[in-house]
Image: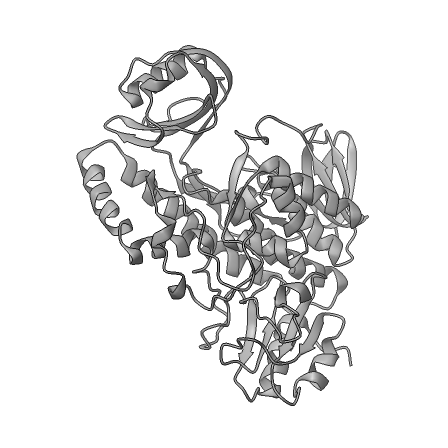
Amino acid sequence: MHDVVIVGAGPVGLFLACELGLAGCSVLVLEREPEPRSPWKADPLGMRGLSAASVEAFYRRGMLQPLLEASGVNDRPGADEPAPPRGVGHFAGMMLDPAKVDVTALPFRLPSPAMEGVMTALEAVETVLSERASMLGVEVRRGVTVSAVAQDDQIVVARAGGREYPARWVVGCDGGRSAVRRLAGFDFAGTEPQFTGYVVLATIADPDRLRPGFNLTPTGMYLRTPAKEYIGMLEFDGGAFDRSRRPTREHLQAVLRRVSGTDVTLSDVHLASSFTDRAMQTTTYRQGRVLLAGDAAHIHSPLGAQGLNLGIGDAMNLGWKLAATVHGYAPDGLLDTYTRERHPIGARVLDWTRAQAAAMKPDPHAQAIQGVIRDLIGTRDGTTYVFEKVSGSSIRYDLGSEQPLVGRNAPDLHLEDGTRLGDLMRDGRGVALDLSTDRCLHGSAMGWESRMRYAAGPARNDLGLGAVLVRPDGIVAWAGDRAPDREAFERAAGRWFGSPAI
């Protein structure tokens, strides 16, 4: 019996498997697809944008350099000055200028080797994660479709292909049509779609009839990318196209002509897929010994490229909490904080995509909203606001503290000896970073030595802090002033890391 069975070997399932493997859990991943490679994962159809928060997660686990190499990114900025964002993306098809981001307004930001976002492909992400998972002893079985999930107070059993896979926990990371979600009886609620979207790889007889980039039109939207033959389009038909049908060349051409207002011709369609802006979320991310992460827990339109990043955030938050529960040292209620912290973030992303769909509708009201938004994102404050949302910089969990850094992603504090906080987090433990002159937290931190690393010394920029306690997911659990309160530190450590071992 494994500690954890993960259903789904996409980026979210693999990232979670790596987190659990790093913590010494026995992990089995079941994947229904027989082969890892697919044209939908490779460039150009598989291109995705990793946010600053996701890049930071790879950095903190020592996987940033392999990710950059697999993604073909060679122009890494230096790590001694805050790097300006290289791309901010768009809101409802309206492009933003990265030069307008006010980096000085971003909360608690310090220079870091992690970049402010990376363009990559799903294939590259999965390759890096698969290699790391294998190194950590994670087993991945492909061509396995889960057909039943049953649980009691002690174990949960996933049944697939006539075999049973018992585990102490099962996590569904099996996408928007999650079998685990359905089989375990999770409630799934939200809003119905307004549009049908299409992603198409096709030979276009007259490509110059289509303007480059995002194009909002009186009848919908279309996107002509720099990648040859790759186009996207939205038609506000209430999500009427049946996804069980394969879109034909004639249907795709008719949609493209309607939304572009041209008589463009698709002479051949190589690959095509459809999607909608249906926005749904489970009411909880846990039912007994079954948990959900990524698209299994929440679905929405791909507008704003939030899905992959939201899922990686789920995996980073869940991994260490589930591992602590498996090993028996988790404080009471720790695993329940997964839903409490991540569900509001998921709900916020669903609203973010809903707002974009509302602004893109081909009617006078939405077009008026577009004019207001264009004015706002033409300002420094407006662009900075959008960047904070899409980069993860604005995320702050409510941990019950008024200290403004607590609950936020930890800045990459850099000690005078050259050690960075990100370097200290590679083994998946928490970090007690003592910046005080007398190392006053050393004795206390030793009680949790197996669950957190202790490091001490002056920092090049300590942000006015004397010490910080960082959870394994990079979130600040406690922060002290220049004379840290040892008892407050011990209370915070007990809350997140359980009773001290000594």
Residue 285 in sight here: no
Q: Image quadrant for the C terminus?
A: bottom right
The residue drawn where x is 72% and y is 76% is 448
Residue 114: quarter of image: bottom right
Which is more toward the observer, 293 or 484?
A: 484
Residue 425: quarter of image: bottom right
On screen, 149 above or below 244?
A: below
Q: Position of residue 346 (x, y in %)?
A: 47, 51
Q: Position of residue 112 (x, y in %)?
A: 55, 61
Image check: 74 left or right of 131?
Answer: left
The residue drawn where x is 50% and y is 68% is 407
Image check: 99 left or right of 484?
Answer: left
Residue 103: quarter of image: bottom left
Q: Position of residue 398 (x, y in %)?
A: 47, 68
Q: How is the image coloured?
A: one colour
Residue 210 in sight here: yes
The residue drawn where x is 62% and y is 88% is 437
On screen, 301 above or below 1?
A: above
Which is more toward the observer, 500 or 122?
A: 122
On screen, 234 above or below 165?
A: above
The residue drawn where x is 46% and y is 21% is 229
Which is more toward the observer, 41 or 159?
A: 41
